[in-house]
Image: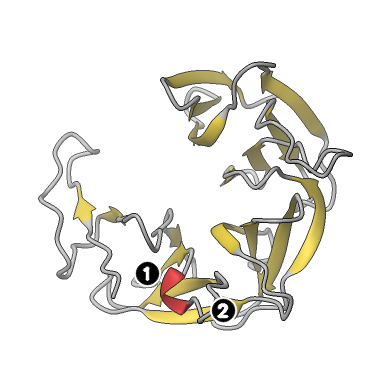
Amino acid sequence: RWIIPVSWAEHCGDEWCEPSIGRPPAEVVAGASAGPGARQPVELPWGADKALLYQTANAWADRNHRYVAGVMLSDDQGASFRLRGYLCREDARHFIEPKVVELSDGRLVLFAREKWQGWIWRSESADGGETWSPIQRTDIPNPSSKFRLLRASDGRIFLLHNPAGIQPDGKWGRRSPLSLWISDDDMRTWRVKVDLVSDDERNLNYPDGFLDEERGEVRFAWEDAYSVYVAAVPMDW
């Protein structure tokens, strides 16, 4: 049985409580473990006491170890959760490390990393995460690597990722470059596609970050299995 511990901060992250599996306060941020990955919470506008966490859902893996993506919804500030989604396919793909972003019309879009074929996959929810559409492949290349979705207050959506798929020889592409894509139209198109970091020798792994809208910057980090790097670039391109 997997257990996800939770730690929270009440003063802008300066001090953190000891990890706990009990009920966190309203300021809950996120918890994680080596198994199911509790990802960044999403505040849903139609319920002040409703938050969305998304996970790799290893707890749902069946006997052939097919990883199933989904969400955990809470109406009581994290005292209890219910699993929704169970996004999978009959051909036993592994969907892991999902991310969720809200569109301008209130729909939720889930992107998931997939282990074998070299693309990001997508599902949508029109009811706050209770039900989800069948997961489908996008045209965004991905070498089975983590990515990050961010939404600005003006509706722009930012995608930090490694846009490299499978090579002609059938092998994964290198996790390079680390790129920033920006969409102005709810991810129908990507107006900006810029490579932030490129490296022919090392992988640029596990990008993460946040939008500092006060300074107009995208602040992000990545690692190469030896060191962690941080940087910032303008939000406007």
* Residue nearer the viewer, 189 or 170: 170
Residue reaching furthest left? 18
- How far across and how far down the image is residue 121, in percent? 72, 60
61 vs 146: above or below: below
**Mark 2 or 1, nearer chain start:** 1
Q: Nearer the viewer, residue 178 or 125?
A: 178
SS of the residue at dot 2? strand
Going 54% across and 33% down the picture, which residue do you hit? 205
Please report the residue visible at 18 percent of the width from the left and 34 percent of the height from the top: 14
Residue to which mark 1 is pinned: 48
Instruction: Check the image and report above or below for 141 versus 116.
Output: above
Give coordinates of residue 143: x percent, y percent: 70, 43
Say if 2 sits above or below 228 in the image: below
Q: Position of residue 192 (x, y in %)?
A: 79, 31
The answer to which quarter of the image holds residue 20 is bottom left
Residue under the image location 49 percent in, 35 percent down: 209
Q: Residue 141 placed where, x, y %?
A: 78, 45
In this rendering, position of residue 85 left or right of residue 183: left
The residue labelled by disc 2 is: 85
Question: Marks 2/1: CA distance?
Answer: 22 Å
Tell me the kind of residue under disc 2. Answer: Gly
- Residue at 57% x, 45% y: name it: 146
Badge 1 marks a residue whose secondary structure is loop
